[in-house]
Image (cartoon, rainbow, N blue to C red):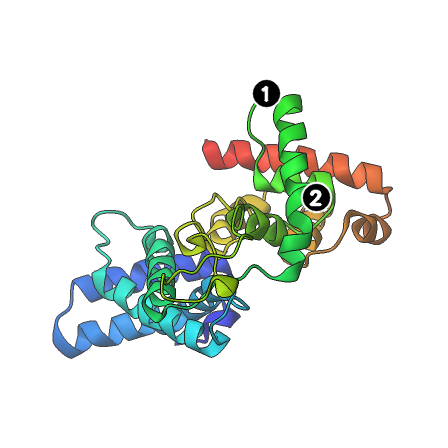
Amino acid sequence: MAPSQTLSDARRRVETARLLSRARASRGDARARYEDDVIRLNMSVATDVARRYHGRGIPADDINQVAFLGLVKAVRGFDPTVGDDFLSYAVPTLRGEIRRYFRDSGWTIRPPRSVQEIQARVVSAEAELTQRLGRGPRPAEIAAHLDVSLPLVVDAMAASGCFTPMSLDASRNDDEASESPADKMGDLDPAFASAEARVALAPLMATLDERDRRVIELRYFENRTQAQIGVEVGVSQEQVSRLLSSILLKLRRQLAA
């Protein structure tokens, strides 16, 4: 089996579905081999999910290990006859295992300083965009409005209300605490930031022209600012903002179709 990082997200999803189908039709060692192939193929997904919880009080290696164990659990428990989208089952499973580990360990989840610094701006932008759009804005819209990376906005929204210290474990000291952030983290719609969203977007990205595709790649996969994108594609920052709004609207409509 080729390493997972050598496959595109779309190809990995197709190959995962094929292997899971064969695993279900097999027994004993043959089934175990197919399941092991699925695990190896999707380890990068587990790493992506685990990375969202790094820097919050538990060593990154420990979180990665929990995510890998969660991936094994997801592969063993997935029923392809219910639905062929493995990630829609696996990612929530991984998040649940990580949050459970935080709770069981009695560790505090602390938002990184970058998240704390951006949170007030996110709250303000959310209120402004809600009034302008007549609905709650998506994280991607807030990121475009503030000209910051989408993962940073998602983390800030997930950590909302978590800056007053309060422990996950009642026996811990107040100065290490947080308001049950583990119950919130990962439950927001991350729009285009998470691994599963990138998989869903892969076939849609192919429908974009070269410039639009590059703009999305720079903004949400390489975390470039609008100013940096403008320099690379040869347009102004204001034009980049309009381009992003137009492209995201097009992609959302295709995802909803």
Mark 1 in CB contact with mark 2 (< 8 angstroms): no
Q: Left or right: where does residue 38 sit relative to residue 150? A: left
Amino acid at the residue labelled 1: Gly
Q: Earlier in the sequence, mark 1 or mark 2?
A: 1
Residue drawn where x is 21% and y is 66% of the image: 23
Q: Left or right: where does residue 239 sit relative to residue 252? A: right
Q: Which mark is residue 212?
A: 2
Name the residue that disc number 1 marks.
Answer: 134
Q: In x, y percent, where is residue 120?
A: 66, 43
Q: In x, y percent, where is residue 175?
A: 52, 64
Give me the C-alpha separation between circle 1 and circle 2.
27 Å
> On screen, 225 above or below 77?
above
Residue drawn where x is 47% and y is 48% of the image: 200
For label 1, the crowd category at 10 Å Cα-Cα, with few meaning under 14, some 14 to 19 and many 20 or more, is few
Residue drawn where x is 38% and y is 56% of the image: 91
Residue 62 in view here: yes
